[in-house]
Amino acid sequence: MSAHCMLSGAQPGFGNTISHSHRRTSRRFNPNIQSKRYWLPSEGRHVRLRLSTKGIKTVDTIGVEAAVARIRARGVKV
């Protein structure tokens, strides 16, 4: 499973870990992805969304219907 948010499109960032001796090694900054189940009243079913924690807060603010509409507008199947 990839570390992508279905709503915001948040994806891993890349950078370096710098040790005390200043050696640099590659590292990856993953978004905090959670799998969350929501009831979708318009379709009468549950949907499971893979969202970042910021995406979960967005769903709480705008509602699940609007969030699913945004996800589908991005071309992601729900």
Image (spheres, rainbow, N blue to C red):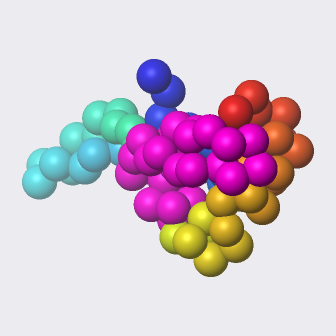
Q: Is residue 9 visible?
A: no
Q: Residue at x 29, y 40 (%)?
A: 24
- Which of the pair 29/22 is nearer the observer? 29
Q: Is residue 14 above or below residue 70?
A: above
The stretch in magenta equals 31-56
Label tally: 0
Q: Which quadrant: the C terminus?
A: top right
- Judging depth in this view, the residue of 44 and 56 nearest the camera is 44
Location of residue 68 with respect to 46 vertically, above or below? below
Quarter of the image for residue 27 reads top left
On the question of residue 40 being in view, the answer is: yes
**Taking 6 as reference, is 13 left or right?**
left
Looking at the image, the residue that sits furthest to the top is 1
Verify whether residue 45 appears in magenta. Answer: yes
Q: Residue furthest front?
A: 44
Looking at the image, the residue that sits furthest to the bottom is 61
The location of residue 68, given as percent across then percent down, is 73, 49
Residue 72 x, y percent position in the rendering: 82, 41
Task: List the single residue furthest toward the left.
Answer: 20
Q: Front-most of 20 and 61?
A: 61
Q: Is residue 24 magenta?
A: no
Q: Is residue 69 above or below residue 26?
A: below
Q: Position of residue 15 (x, y in %)?
A: 43, 45
Q: Position of residue 13 (x, y in %)?
A: 51, 45
Write down the quadrant of residue 23 in the picture. top left
What predominant SS class does the magenta segment belong to? Answer: strand
Please state if 8 lies on the left or on the right of 18 as rendered. Answer: right
Q: Quadrant of the N terminus?
A: top left
Who's the residue at 44% across and 47% down the image? 36
Residue ID at (57%, 50%) = 39
Residue at 49% from the left image edge and 53% from the top image edge: 52
